[in-house]
Image (tube, rainbow, N blue to C red):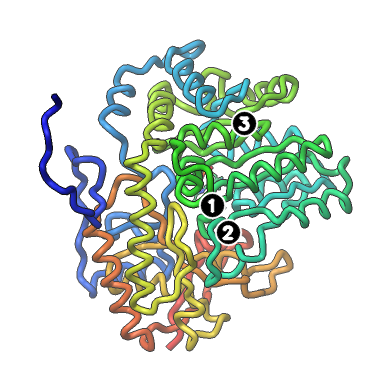
């Protein structure tokens, strides 16, 4: 007879972080006066702040996560051989086991995989449809002369509209694009999971399958931008009928089974600080991409990575698929979202995978769009709480190629969570800071640009507050 546990198991609301912390990194507390000085010296641009002046850094979830003791152990035991290192074969085996793709090409990060793929497939006049291309994907397509076309469903562009899979691609628009542009002008169809630029929103399995079938019915390959494949798998598990009993790895394998290849930044769901890969089924394309890899990244058994990076990714890909981890990860953002919504702070809803997006234009209607409400809110977040997010709005997207200014569709502040780094008390603190700002939002002033670079200005722009 097995022993009996006589207690009713209570329904516990608190989601426990699925790790204990054995190595800690101190963070710096600053005074309000110091923060005012640091921000002014940085030209009111949080990108130009020293990271140790920041208490909670939500600038990005890319490469900023904490690695596990297993990953560190793998890194110590890595093989740094130039050719044929065991660390590469471990990496390749992990990627093949999860994705099922035939060829695995390691790169130093996601954009290198994009560059190699697009340089060999996209030319002037070609169109690459996707739900929403991430900035680097778009830029890598555009530098070849191609067009990156975003076809996310209408709900995906409306911050307040609730939909379980706001990252879905509009299938009618996809068919229309293929018909009007012509099959011969489309190298492949892409899908970004989760849809980062659209609020970290997931794509349903039904949509992935349908987009794949549509592409294949025209003889077109179907490629995933798989940076956050594990988070997308968890949303399918939670929200899509027929997947509640499937594990994240089973769901991930099904997602990849519909694709002919993927680009991947292992700085996200690879749980590593650097790394990425391009994976493909097509033998000929893999051959040309590998040749270019040797030219730009390195020998095919390390690409742009050290042996220890390959180890970290080989182990991290599985850790990203751990249900206990994913429950904590996705719940963290949802928990913050619930607190902010209860306080009347407008956010992109429902909350997505890696980040929470504040709708600054709705929150700060007194700041004209020309004075960058999202940039202003992000600066207030630093001044009040030492927290750094990132503006996804008119500073980032508003400068047109001819130098004129056009406000972007939305003015959002993205609060992206590094993986396994912050605990619930950090999130509670963040909610308190945002509520405190909301209570005195009339004091948030707009900003004007005093200096800017001709492209990608948000990284280096300098501004001043409007009195
Ligand atoms: N695709 C998506 C969807 C991404 O979010 C990113 C990076 C990349 C590709 C490029 O990968 O940085 O390894 O070269 N996103 C980071 C972010 C930078 O902050 O969202 P990378």
- Residues at badges 2 and 1 in contact (C-beta under 8 Å)? yes
The answer to which quarter of the image holds residue 390 is bottom left
Q: Residues within 10 Å of mark 2 (few under 14, many from 20)?
A: many
Residue 199 point in image, percent of width and height: 52, 60
Q: Is residue 407 visible?
A: yes
Q: Nearer the viewer, residue 112 or 200?
A: 200
| Earlier sequence position, callout 2 versus callout 1 | 2
Relative to 467, residue 217 above or below: above
**Rendered residue at 12%/46% (across/down):** 7
Residue 139 point in image, percent of width and height: 66, 50
| Earlier sequence position, callout 3 versus callout 2 | 2
Q: CA distance from mark 3 to mark 2?
A: 22 Å
Residue 118 horizontal side relative to residue 88, left or right: right
Q: CA distance from mark 3 to mark 1?
A: 17 Å
The answer to which quarter of the image holds residue 244 is top left
Q: Secondary structure at mark 3?
A: helix
| Earlier sequence position, callout 3 versus callout 1 | 1
Q: CA distance from mark 2 to mark 1?
A: 6 Å
Q: Quadrant of the C terminus?
A: bottom left
| Residue occupied by mark 1 | 202
Q: Is residue 268 visible?
A: no
Q: Secondary structure at mark 2?
A: loop
**Rendered residue at 77%/43% (across/down):** 214
Q: Secondary structure at mark 1?
A: loop
- Residues at badges 3 and 1 in contact (C-beta under 8 Å)? no
| Label 2 beta carbon within 8 A of ligand 1 | no
Residue 432 point in image, percent of width and height: 26, 72
| Residue occupied by mark 2 | 166
| Residue occupied by mark 3 | 257
Relative to 364, residue 149 above or below: above
**Rendered residue at 56%/62% (across/down):** 457
Q: Residues within 10 Å of mark 3 (few under 14, many from 20)?
A: some
């Amino acid at each position: 007879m097995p022993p009996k546990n006589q207690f009713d198991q209570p329904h516990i609301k608190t989601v426990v972080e699925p790790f204990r912390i054995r190595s800690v990194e101190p963070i710096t507390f600053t005074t309000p006066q110091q923060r005012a000085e640091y921000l002014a010296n940085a030209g009111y641009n949080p990108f130009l702040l020293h990271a140790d002046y920041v208490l909670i850094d939500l600038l990005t979830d890319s490469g900023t996560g904490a690695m596990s003791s297993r990953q560190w152990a793998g890194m110590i035991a890595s093989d740094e051989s130039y050719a044929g290192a065991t660390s590469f074969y471990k990496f390749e085996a992990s990627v093949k086991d999860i994705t099922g793709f035939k060829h695995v090409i390691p790169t130093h990060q996601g954009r290198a995989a994009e560059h190699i793929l697009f340089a060999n497939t996209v030319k002037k006049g070609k169109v690459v449809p996707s739900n929403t291309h991430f900035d680097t994907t778009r830029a890598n397509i555009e530098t070849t002369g191609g067009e990156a076309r975003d076809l996310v469903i209408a709900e995906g562009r409306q911050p307040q509209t609730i939909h379980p899979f706001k990252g879905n691609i509009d299938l009618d628009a996809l068919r229309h694009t293929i018909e009007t542009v012509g099959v011969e002008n489309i190298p492949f169809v892409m899908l970004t999971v989760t849809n980062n630029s659209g609020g970290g929103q997931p794509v349903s399995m039904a949509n992935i399958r349908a987009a794949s079938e549509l592409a294949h019915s025209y003889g077109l390959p179907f490629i995933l931008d798989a940076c956050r494949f594990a988070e997308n798998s968890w949303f399918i598990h939670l929200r899509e009928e027929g997947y509640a009993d499937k594990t994240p790895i089973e769901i991930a394998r099904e997602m990849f089974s519909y694709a002919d290849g993927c680009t991947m930044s292992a700085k996200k769901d690879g749980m590593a600080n650097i790394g990425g890969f391009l994976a493909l089924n097509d033998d000929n394309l893999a051959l040309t991409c590998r040749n270019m890899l040797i030219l730009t990244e390195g020998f095919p058994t390390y690409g742009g990575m050290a042996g220890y990076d390959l180890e970290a990714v080989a182990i991290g890909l599985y850790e990203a698929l751990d249900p206990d981890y994913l429950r904590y990860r996705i719940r963290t953002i949802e928990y913050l979202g619930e607190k902010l919504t209860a306080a009347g702070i407008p956010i992109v809803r429902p909350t997505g995978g890696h980040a929470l997006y504040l709708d600054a234009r709705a929150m700060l209607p007194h700041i004209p769009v020309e004075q960058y409400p999202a940039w202003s809110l992000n600066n207030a977040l630093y001044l009040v709480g030492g927290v750094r997010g990132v503006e996804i709005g008119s500073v980032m997207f508003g400068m047109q190629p001819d130098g004129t200014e056009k406000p972007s569709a939305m003015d959002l502040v993205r609060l992206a969570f590094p993986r396994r780094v912050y605990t619930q008390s950090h999130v509670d603190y963040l909610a308190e800071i945002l509520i405190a700002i909301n209570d005195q939002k009339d004091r948030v002033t707009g900003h004007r640009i005093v200096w800017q670079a001709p492209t990608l200005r948000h990284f280096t722009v300098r501004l001043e507050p409007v009195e």
